[in-house]
Image (cartoon, grey):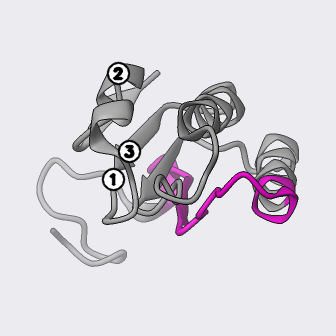
């Protein structure tokens, strides 16, 4: 890869490359209480309203406190519905997530949801 002043052969100068905007979210810890859900909704609204436009969302670990939430399946559904409506999402479960429930939603391991 070349520098901005000297791009590598076949590479466009930085000023001519399209920017890619990636939002990274982690440690949502939805647990059935209102505060984590309200925070997630506020973040989703901010991403949706971003003037930059979001090209991809990367969500890493601890989406739901699966052992504490009274309905972790609904929590995963909420996260999926809020974020996938904004941009493609890459999911990576954490130690507090229920991988079986995530797999049922279609986003266990590292996967892109569009």
Compared with 35, 6 (above or below) is below
The residue carrying mark 2 is 104
Of residue 66 and residue 29, the one placed in the foreground of this image is 66
Residue at the disc numbered 1: 93
Asked if residue 36 is positioned above or below residue 82 in the image, the reply reads: below
In 3D space, how far apart are the residues under numbered discs 1 and 2 (Cα atoms)? Answer: 13 Å
Q: Position of residue 33 (x, y in %)?
A: 79, 58
Label 3, on which residue? 91
Secondary structure under tag 2 reads helix
Q: Residues within 10 Å of mark 2 (few under 14, many from 20)?
A: few
Which of the two discs, 1 and 2, labels the residue nearer the N terminus?
1
Q: Is residue 109 left or right of residue 18?
A: left
Q: Quadrant of residue 101?
A: top left
Query: Residue 43 location in percent, x, y?
Result: 78, 56
Circles 3 and 1 in contact, beta carbons < 8 Å: yes
Residue 30: which quarter of the image? bottom right
Q: Residues within 10 Å of mark 1 (few under 14, many from 20)?
A: many
């Amino acid at each position: 890869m070349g520098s901005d002043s000297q791009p590598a052969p076949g590479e466009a100068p930085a000023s001519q490359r399209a920017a890619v905007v990636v939002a990274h979210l982690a440690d949502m810890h939805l647990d059935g209480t209102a505060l984590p859900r309200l925070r997630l909704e506020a973040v989703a609204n901010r991403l949706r309203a971003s003037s930059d436009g979001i090209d991809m969302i990367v969500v890493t670990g601890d989406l739901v406190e699966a052992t504490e939430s009274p309905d972790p399946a609904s929590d995963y559904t909420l996260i999926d519905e809020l974020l996938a409506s904004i941009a493609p999402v890459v999911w990576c479960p954490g130690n507090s997530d229920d991988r079986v429930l995530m797999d049922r939603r279609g986003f266990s391991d590292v996967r892109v949801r569009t």
